[in-house]
Image: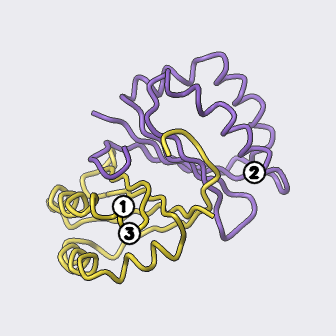
Chain colours: A purple, B yellow
Amino acid sequence: MTYGYIGSMKTMPGRRDEVVAHLLSGADGLRAAGCELYVVGVAEDDDVTIWVSEVWKSERHHKNSLELPETKAAIGKVMPMLTAEFTRQTLSIAGGLGL
Amino acid sequence: MTYGYIGSMKTMPGRRDEVVAHLLSGADGLRAAGCELYVVGVAEDDDVTIWVSEVWKSERHHKNSLELPETKAAIGKVMPMLTAEFTRQTLSIAGGLGL
């Protein structure tokens, strides 16, 4: 079953653009890890919230991607710019347009 | 600026598959209205929650799509199967993979 993930994070004040740039810098490499969709958006109603919407071939592909050295390095760079306020929702993808 | 929308809804018990089918039935027609991405997923941790993640050419395209007769008809069919528990988040899309 195609696996979906929707998550949000909040950055320290003034750091959102920097975090977004980090998140986008590795996006192209995710395809080889089984990622079919990775969309980064910023909330319009504040200056610190980022939402990420992802579709993966399977939950296993997503989990394995988190163990890749480049993923761990990216998380290490980004985490100090984030607060501890996260949301996460895992999904089974039913379908849609543009997948 | 590319416009994003992430929303969730909850269905009455036993109606989720039916609502998902309705949401997917009109997906192909959304492209002509300026929709670039429309992903429907179901929560893995309950039997009633649906998440929709959308990317549109602009907020105006999204708003206009809600006025289309087919959209209004679809909303009319689906609404009686939903509870009043919605979440919504509007976004400016920064980029990603698969767009």
The amino acid type, in three-letter code, at marker 2 is Thr
Q: Exactly how many numbered labels are in the figure?
A: 3
Q: Give residue A1's mark.
A: none
**What residue did someone put label 3 on?**
B33
> Dot 2, how many residues are within 10 Å of its Cα: few (below 14), some (14-19), or many (20+)?
many
In this picture, residue A30 sits left or right of residue B28 = right
Q: Secondary structure at mark 2?
A: strand
Task: Give how far across and how far down residue B58 sits, in percent.
Answer: 54, 69
Q: Chain of mark 1?
A: B
Q: Secondary structure at mark 1?
A: helix
| Residue linked to disc 2 | A11
* Residue extending farthest top: A69
Mark 1 highlights which residue? B31
State which chain disc 2 sits on.
A
Residue with the most extreme right position: A14
Q: Quadrant of the N terminus of chain A?
A: top left
**Residue at point 46% right, 31% down?**
A35
B63 or A19: which is nearer to us? B63
